[in-house]
Amino acid sequence: MKGSIVSMDAIYCQKDICRQLIDKKADYVLSLKKNHATLYDDVSLYLDTQIKKQAVEVKEEIEKGHGRIEIRRYALSPHIDWLESKEDWIGLKAIGMVESIREINGKQEKQLRYYLTSLTDLTKFSETARDTAILNLTFHPVFGLAGGIGSKLCSMNAISASQPQSTDS
């Protein structure tokens, strides 16, 4: 796992998983949902406020095709000193947000997703979040069967940072 970026859905957004990934010299992007209510509220409020104040960089992608338009906006903030529980999440260096707006035949859907991550580079974060969304749409039914951090199914979401994925643990 050394050198990989591992992204996981909210079911794996657990402090112990962060420790295991950092121990294996991997980075992580963990989806944050409302099951971590206080943390979710803190992260969403902070990022939403920073974006409105234009105090954080936002990367935007627009895709058109097959009768639809999709706009994705990515934001990443390494400014987490204010976050009370940051020490509980080993390796946590930033919080991120992805806003997806899809328009199909005049109907618009908007989705906001928030993340905890050991990444501080907006491009790496956006690429990982986008690739994970595609994988989750494709493979999500089988991810629920994963047996833990060492499982082959979980490693399907491991994205090499800069070199081919290592097979040594």
Image: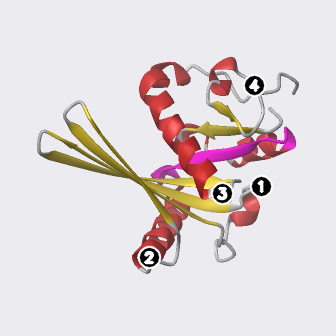
CB atoms at circles 3 and 2 under 8 Å apart?
no
Would you place residue 152 above or below residue 69 in this image?
above
Residue beneath disc 4: 150
Q: Residue at x 46, y 32 (%)?
A: 134
Which residue type does callout 3 highlight? Answer: Asp
* Residue projecting furthest to the bottom: 53
* Number of residues whose C-alpha sits closer than 10 Å to that of mark 3, classed few (under 14), some (14–19) or many (20 or more): few
Q: Nearer the viewer, mark 3 or mark 1?
A: 3
Colour basis = secondary structure
Disc with the residue nearer the chain's start (3 vs 1): 1
Disc with the residue nearer the chain's start (1 vs 4): 1
Q: CA distance from mark 3 to mark 4?
A: 26 Å
Residue beneath disc 3: 121
- Residue 102 on image: x %, y %: 27, 45
Disc with the residue nearer the chain's start (3 vs 4): 3
Magenta stretch, residue numbers: 23-35
Q: CA distance from mark 1 to mark 4?
A: 19 Å
- Residue 40 on image: x %, y %: 50, 60
Q: Secondary structure at mark 3?
A: loop
Q: Is 132 included in the stretch rendered in magenta?
A: no
Q: CA distance from mark 3 to mark 1?
A: 14 Å
Inspect this view and state whether residue 144 appears. Answer: no
* Number of residues whose C-alpha sits closer than 10 Å to that of mark 4, classed few (under 14), some (14–19) or many (20 or more): few
Which residue type does callout 4 highlight? Answer: Gly
Q: 9 or 51: which is nearer to us?
A: 51
- Residue 36 on image: x %, y %: 54, 55
Which residue type does callout 2 highlight? Answer: Thr
Q: Residue at x 55, y 53 (%)?
A: 115
CB atoms at circles 3 and 1 under 8 Å apart?
no
Disc with the residue nearer the chain's start (3 vs 2): 2
Q: CA distance from mark 3 to mark 2?
A: 20 Å
CB atoms at circles 1 and 2 under 8 Å apart?
no
